Image (cartoon, rainbow, N blue to C red):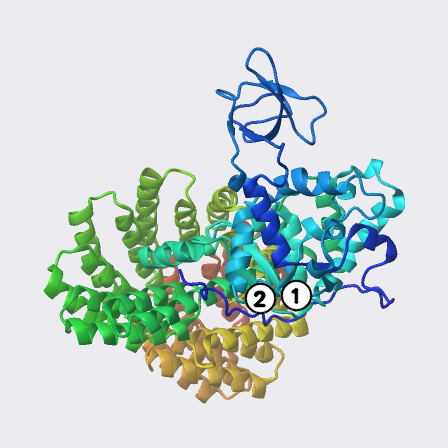
């Protein structure tokens, strides 16, 4: 891959708040005995590399790598320095951190470690330390160099690298980055040459106290302050897939300091890694997105010395506002930007080298998939449209590759909430695939699944079900009854059944999907956790909270085990469990889970990610339920700000938060503000979803509630009736949402003391809820309670008491004795008896 790949990234992240020393010195005198801020010329670094490879440096050093455990301290993979040979053909070998040498057979116990395989740590151990440990004063390698090879303080680039990486790879990456024309004049700061390695290798108990304290001060403050004075920072990655520096605490701490300095921060590859990244993009952009989504968690990063890890942890705790969450989110945001820029650079090079060729089109469409999965929809759309245009021009309209680009275009439009555009792209893709591949090809089924998803979003549930069921039959025929794609399609069918209130059928489909996944993937696969979570959603809709909670807990266990404690999917599962606690009125537990989910989401995805929306909304809802209105509004408005930034101001997802904010204002009696937010939500939903979508009906319901509260009953009924007609047309006349609107219409009649009309609507609502939700659902209890209130107002106290007691029985069973709804039922029961 040409040298320019990956070189345009420049960090543009917000600078973070660190504790700062008041004095103007970046490094104290004691620190300068450990760390020299002067840089080394790249020319000198190249000379060290050449000297090691030729044998001129460390000429008497012979290294081996153990191929088995040689002692309790010397494990397989450990590097040994060979000492004298024994008479029996064995060699003695020593390791820096082990007191006693060990005998080994160089034929069977170890393999020779060629000099090009020496790690940065090997260079420190066998070149730097031997050359400097006999020096009387500061034992820093710079003292051995000619003046021309020693730069000034903070000159050039700060270089962060993991010591387990190969030294020749690091040097080659630097040489490639600066180029032959700049190698003679380039200066870099590398700790292996500019730090006192003999002193740093000592244990703290063998080091003077003032030096230990100086080292701590450097880690906490001096290092990051020094970084801010370099021209740029370079982070060396030995591999793009799982770079060693991302697993080392020192490197991550340095990377965070570089980001926070406000200076340019750039990743540099070992040679060949940039090409490998691009090859993977072209082979499977979905898998590439999965790999790069594996976020860094500095809590899990390691140090060779435990005391160093403790020192870094202390520095994070004492100097960084937000601690690990701030550090991790900053590093992960930078990594996400770096991966995106690497992709952009590769696409730009392809444009320059492959002018409107099919290879360029392939690059563009696959990069579009990668950008879409990264949430970068505008770039995805631009690249996909360009790639599609090239393919149409070269191949014509009826071609499998054209259909593939159309399918990706549909996915991008769907992610943007542009459902009509998405459906048009998918429809053309489907027609093309059928012409080229036949009606029963798996790719045809895949497009049908995608079209079903768009119909589901548009609440065209009949069409969604038709598409999903056709896809299911194709997958079963072509792939077999127990294939993973069959499980995915069953999950999609379940989503339609759940949306239309057919919960038993949804439950059956989710259970079948779960069974297939367990069989195909194993009991502890992350996709099994997804099915468990989806099953929990159905149980939650049925008011079966404890069963739903058990599903979420099982999903959480699998995801933590498979993905780690701080993965975004773990956050989503915690959020689902928090929703259960909130429904049960267990607000402290709900807040604990929401806050933990929010912390993980910020940690992994940054402080402005769309995954936060669910957690922010949940926290706001808890605060609202607790009467903490201003806190609720603050969280809803933070969600609104992040969502608008990510999706744009007219995305249907924005309307959800606008509705929630309107609801808080309505509860406060601030009707003008409530209507303002509701009407904005209504405008967005009609524009994005059409006039007859259930989400439009939802907002009409909310507007009607405001008019009812104002005593504007005629207008309230008008909006409720419009909402009712939309829901009946979209969902059928026996759907729970229809029942909810009937309940709300009854409230208007109740407010006007038109009790018989209220009873008629309440009882119709009750009938639907019992039919669709079962007799013991908390929503059934709500309508029973409301019917009781009507009889109470009509002085039919015995009948009222019966309804209140039935409502209380359900609420005690499902919500518990301390839930506000349970307490409300008990208060009305007491009033009836009195």
Q: Residue 598: in sight, yes or no?
A: no
Q: Nearer the viewer, residue 794 or 393?
A: 393
User: For residue 83, which quarter of the picture?
Assistant: top right
- The answer to which of marks 1 and 2 sits earlier in the sequence is 1
Q: CA distance from mark 1 to mark 2?
A: 43 Å
Q: Residue 686 vs residue 145: left or right?
A: left
Residue 513 in the image, given as x and y percentages of width and height: 32, 47
Residue drawn at x 49%, y 44% as measured from the top left? 550
Mark 1 secondary-structure assignment: loop
In the picture, the disc for residue 789 is none
Residue 122 in the image, given as x and y percentages of width and height: 62, 39
Q: Which residue is mark 1?
A: 156
Residue 51 in the image, given as x and y percentages of width and height: 59, 45
User: For residue 736, which quarter of the picture?
Assistant: bottom left
Q: Nearer the viewer, residue 722 or 619?
A: 619
Q: Which residue is mark 2?
A: 616
Q: Residue 124: in sight, yes or no?
A: yes
| 10 Å crowding of disc 1: few (<14), some (14-19), many (20+) | many
User: For residue 774, which quarter of the picture?
Assistant: bottom left
Q: Nearer the viewer, residue 224 or 114?
A: 114
Mark 2 secondary-structure assignment: helix
Residue 399 in the image, given as x and y percentages of width and height: 15, 67
| 10 Å crowding of disc 2: few (<14), some (14-19), many (20+) | many
Q: Nearer the viewer, residue 253 or 481?
A: 253
Q: Relative to residue 69, is residue 3 depicted above or below?
A: below
Q: Relative to residue 716, is residue 576 depicted above or below?
A: above
Count numbered badges in the picture: 2
User: Which image quarter is the C terminus in?
Assistant: bottom right
User: Which image quarter is the N terminus in?
Assistant: bottom left
């Amino acid at each position: 891959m040409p040298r320019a790949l990956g070189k345009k990234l420049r960090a543009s992240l917000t600078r973070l708040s660190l504790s700062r020393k008041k004095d103007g010195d970046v490094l104290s005198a004691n620190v300068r005995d450990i760390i020299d801020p002067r840089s080394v010329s790249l020319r000198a670094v190249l000379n060290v590399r050449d000297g090691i490879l030729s044998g001129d440096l460390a000429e008497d050093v012979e290294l081996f790598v153990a191929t088995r455990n040689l002692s309790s301290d010397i494990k397989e993979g450990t590097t040994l320095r060979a000492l004298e040979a024994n008479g029996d053909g064995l060699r003695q070998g020593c390791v820096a951190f082990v007191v006693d040498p060990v005998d080994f057979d160089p034929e069977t116990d170890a393999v020779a470690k060629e000099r090009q395989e020496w790690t940065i740590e090997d260079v420190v151990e066998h070149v730097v330390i031997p050359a400097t440990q006999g020096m009387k004063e500061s034992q820093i390698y710079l003292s051995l160099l000619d003046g021309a090879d020693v730069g000034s303080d903070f000159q050039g680039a700060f270089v962060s690298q993991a010591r387990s990486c190969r030294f020749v790879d690091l040097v080659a990456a630097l040489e490639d980055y600066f180029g032959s024309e700049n190698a003679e004049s380039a200066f870099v700061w590398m700790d292996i040459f500019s730090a006192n390695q003999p002193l740093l290798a000592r244990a703290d108990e063998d080091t003077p106290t003032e030096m230990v304290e100086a080292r701590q001060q450097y880690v906490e403050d001096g290092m990051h302050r020094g970084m801010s004075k370099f021209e740029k920072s370079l982070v060396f990655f030995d591999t793009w897939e799982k770079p060693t520096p991302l697993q080392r605490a020192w490197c991550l701490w340095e990377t965070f300091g570089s980001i926070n300095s406000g200076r340019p921060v750039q990743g540099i590859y070992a040679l060949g890694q940039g090409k490998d990244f691009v090859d993977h993009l072209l082979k499977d952009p979905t898998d590439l997105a999965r790999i790069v989504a594996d976020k860094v968690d500095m809590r899990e990063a390691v140090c060779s010395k435990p005391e160093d890890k403790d020192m870094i942890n202390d520095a994070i705790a004492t100097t960084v506002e937000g601690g690990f969450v701030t550090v991790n989110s900053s590093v992960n945001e930078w990594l996400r930007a770096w991966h995106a820029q690497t992709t952009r650079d590769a696409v730009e090079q392809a444009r320059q080298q492959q002018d409107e060729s099919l290879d360029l089109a392939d690059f563009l469409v696959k990069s579009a998939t990668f950008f879409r999965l990264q949430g970068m929809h505008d770039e995805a759309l631009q690249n996909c449209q360009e790639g599609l245009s090239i393919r149409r021009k070269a191949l014509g309209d009826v071609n499998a590759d054209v259909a593939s680009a159309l399918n990706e275009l549909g996915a991008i439009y769907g992610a943007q909430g542009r459902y009509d555009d998405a459906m048009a792209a998918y429809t053309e893709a489907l027609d093309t695939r059928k012409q080229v591949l036949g009606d029963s090809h798996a790719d045809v089924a895949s497009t049908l699944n995608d079209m079903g998803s768009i119909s589901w979003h548009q609440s065209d549930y009949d069409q969604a079900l038709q598409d999903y069921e056709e896809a299911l039959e194709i997958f079963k025929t072509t792939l077999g009854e127990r294939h993973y794609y069959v499980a995915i399609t069953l999950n999609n069918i379940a989503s339609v059944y759940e949306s239309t209130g057919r919960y038993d059928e949804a439950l059956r489909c989710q259970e079948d999907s779960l069974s297939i996944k367990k069989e195909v993937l194993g009991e502890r696969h992350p996709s099994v956790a997804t099915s468990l979570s989806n099953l929990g959603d159905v149980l939650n809709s049925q008011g079966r909270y404890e069963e739903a909670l058990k599903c979420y807990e099982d999903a959480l266990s699998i995801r933590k085990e498979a993905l780690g404690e701080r993965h975004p999917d773990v956050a989503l599962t915690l959020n689902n469990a928090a929703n259960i606690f909130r429904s049960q009125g267990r607000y402290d537990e709900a807040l604990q889970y929401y806050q933990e989910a929010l912390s993980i989401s910020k940690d992994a995805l940054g402080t402005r990610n769309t995954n936060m929306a669910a957690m922010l909304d949940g926290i706001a809802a808890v605060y609202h339920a607790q009467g903490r209105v201003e806190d609720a509004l603050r969280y809803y408005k933070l969600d609104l700000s992040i969502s608008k930034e990510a999706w744009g101001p007219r995305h249907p997802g924005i309307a959800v938060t606008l509705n929630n904010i309107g609801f808080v204002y309505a509860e406060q009696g601030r009707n003008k503000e409530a209507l303002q937010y509701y009407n904005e939500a209504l405008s967005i939903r009609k524009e994005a979803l059409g006039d007859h979508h259930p989400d439009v009906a939802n907002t009409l319901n909310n507007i009607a509630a405001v008019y009812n509260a104002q005593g504007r009953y005629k207008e309230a009924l008008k909006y409720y009736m419009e909402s009712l007609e939309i829901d009946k047309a979209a969902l059928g006349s026996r759907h729970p949402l229809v029942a909810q609107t009937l309940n709300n219409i009854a409230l208007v009649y109740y407010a006007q003391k038109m009790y018989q009309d209220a009873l008629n609507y309440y009882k119709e609502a009750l009938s639907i809820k019992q039919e669709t939700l079962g007799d013991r659902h908390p929503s059934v209890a709500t309508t029973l309670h409301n019917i009781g209130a009507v009889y109470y107002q009509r002085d039919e106290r015995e009948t009222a008491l019966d309804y209140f007691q039935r409502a209380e029985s359900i609420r005690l069973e499902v919500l518990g004795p301390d839930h506000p709804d349970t307490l409300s039922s008990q208060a009305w029961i007491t009033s009836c008896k009195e």
